[in-house]
Image: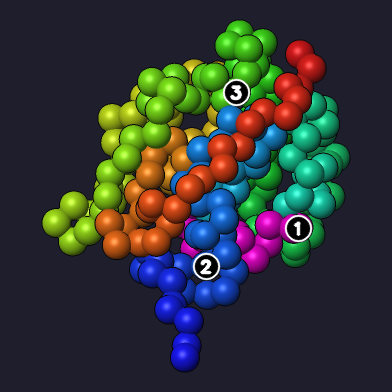
């Protein structure tokens, strides 16, 4: 007798995407390190598929010092010149440069708000927005909350943080729960990612 196949959101079509969907997407994250990683990766996705970025995630982690905010903030134009020639990631100079800028912006946010997590979660009043998705209630490209987050991040100097990117970031980090109404992951218990250590300011 075959085991019942898991019901997933329609986009989880490959093994890698299914694993990401089942274990990470939509899980509430309060870990500054992880939140910074997702902000960078969602910005890198602009104009591309998420599967492309997911397949290059190890390359991003290797080249951007495992997304250590302090270390990335100290990277220089020489690092950008080196990284832009590395095929392990998307070789888009603007996106690579934005990673350094965004790390510096996140450090400023941490200094002013205590943590990056406290800052981003304030846009949803500290609780995930839970909206079961189906044909009658499809996933939007953006929301008033992602508009506000995008505007605030831009004020800190962040790049590649338009409202659509911010909404994808909110989905990935669990600020919103956009799993389909018949998806097994919608009601599956989620382990909140807690902040392990704040970057030094």
Q: Position of residue 182 (x, y in %)?
A: 29, 62
Contact flag, marks 2 and 1 (Cβ < 8 Å): no
Furthest toward the front, the residue is 1
Quote the CA–CA distance across marks 3 and 1.
24 Å
Furthest toward the left, the residue is 136
Return the mark for residue 116. Answer: 3
Return the mark for residue 59. Answer: 1
Quote the CA–CA distance across marks 2 and 1.
20 Å
- Does 47 appear in magenta? yes
Mark 1 residue crowding within 10 angstroms, few (<14) / some (14–19) / many (20+): some
At horizontal 68% and vertical 62% (from top left) the residue drawn is 56
At horizontal 73% and vertical 29% (from top left) the residue drawn is 196
Callout 3: helix, strand or loop?
helix
Residue that numbered label 2 is attached to: 18
- Does 126 appear in magenta? no
Q: Is residue 197 above or below residue 160?
A: above
Q: Nearer the viewer, residue 139 or 197?
A: 197
Q: Position of residue 200 (x, y in %)?
A: 79, 17
Q: Nearer the viewer, mark 2 or mark 3?
A: 2
Q: Nearer the viewer, mark 2 or mark 1?
A: 2
Q: Nearer the viewer, mark 3 or mark 1?
A: 3
- Residue 106 seen in the figure: yes
At horizontal 67% and vertical 28% (from top left) the residue drawn is 195
Q: Nearer the viewer, residue 190 or 79?
A: 190
Mark 3 residue crowding within 10 angstroms, few (<14) / some (14–19) / many (20+): many
């Amino acid at each position: 007798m075959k085991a019942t196949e898991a019901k997933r959101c329609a986009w989880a079509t490959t093994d890698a995407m299914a694993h990401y969907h089942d274990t990470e997407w939509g899980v509430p994250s309060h870990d500054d390190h992880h939140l910074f990683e997702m902000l960078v990766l969602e910005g890198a996705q602009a104009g591309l598929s998420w599967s492309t970025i997911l397949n290059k995630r190890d390359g991003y982690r290797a080249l951007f010092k495992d997304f250590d905010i302090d270390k990335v903030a100290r990277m220089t134009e020489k690092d950008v010149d080196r990284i832009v020639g590395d095929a392990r990631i998307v070789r888009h100079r603007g996106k690579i440069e934005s990673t350094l800028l965004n790390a510096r912006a996140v450090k400023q946010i941490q200094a002013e708000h205590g943590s990056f997590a406290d800052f981003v979660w304030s846009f949803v009043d500290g609780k995930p927005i839970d909206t079961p998705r189906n044909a009658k209630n499809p996933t939007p490209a953006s929301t008033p909350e992602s508009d506000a987050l995008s505007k605030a991040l831009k004020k800190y100097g962040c790049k590649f943080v338009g409202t659509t990117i911010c909404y994808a970031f909110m989905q990935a980090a669990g600020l919103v729960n956009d799993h389909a109404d018949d998806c097994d992951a919608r009601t599956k218990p989620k382990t909140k990612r807690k902040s392990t250590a704040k970057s030094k300011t």
